[in-house]
């Protein structure tokens, strides 16, 4: 989410894929759960920021 370029985003995605592949099967479900929780939290934060900016633009 915070990648500045497509190349940086690709590198982060590859790092996550490599980390996931290295996990034992018994830990993959927990990894997925934590990743989904993180993504949901970040999406909520982004939505809140967007709505705040959008609301401020409407006030001008």
Image: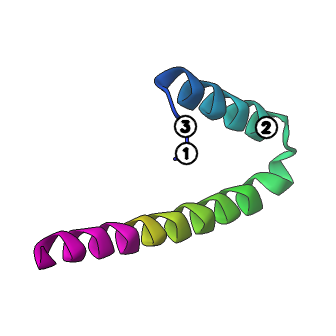
Q: Which residue is mark 2?
A: 19
Q: Is residue 10 left or right of residue 55?
A: right
Q: Nearer the viewer, residue 20 or 12?
A: 12
Residue farthest to the top?
7
Q: Position of residue 54 (x, y in %)?
A: 22, 69
Query: What span is colored magenta in the figure?
Result: 47-60
Q: Is residue 27 left or right of residue 31?
A: right
Which of the marked residues, 3 or 2, is nearer the chain's N terminus?
3
Mark toward the viewer: 3 or 2: 3
Q: Which is the main secondary structure of the residues drawn in magenta?
A: helix
Q: CA distance from mark 3 to mark 1?
A: 4 Å
Residue farthest to the front?
60
Q: Do the residues under discs 3 and 1 have CB atoms within 8 angstroms?
A: yes
Q: Nearer the viewer, residue 33 or 1?
A: 1
Q: Which residue is mark 3?
A: 3
Q: Which residue is mark 1?
A: 2
């Amino acid at each position: 989410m915070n990648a500045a370029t497509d190349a940086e985003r690709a590198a982060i995605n590859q790092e996550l894929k490599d980390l996931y592949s290295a996990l034992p099967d018994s830990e993959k479900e927990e990894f997925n759960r934590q990743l989904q929780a993180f993504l949901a939290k970040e999406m909520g934060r982004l939505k809140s920021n967007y709505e705040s900016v959008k609301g401020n633009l409407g006030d001008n």
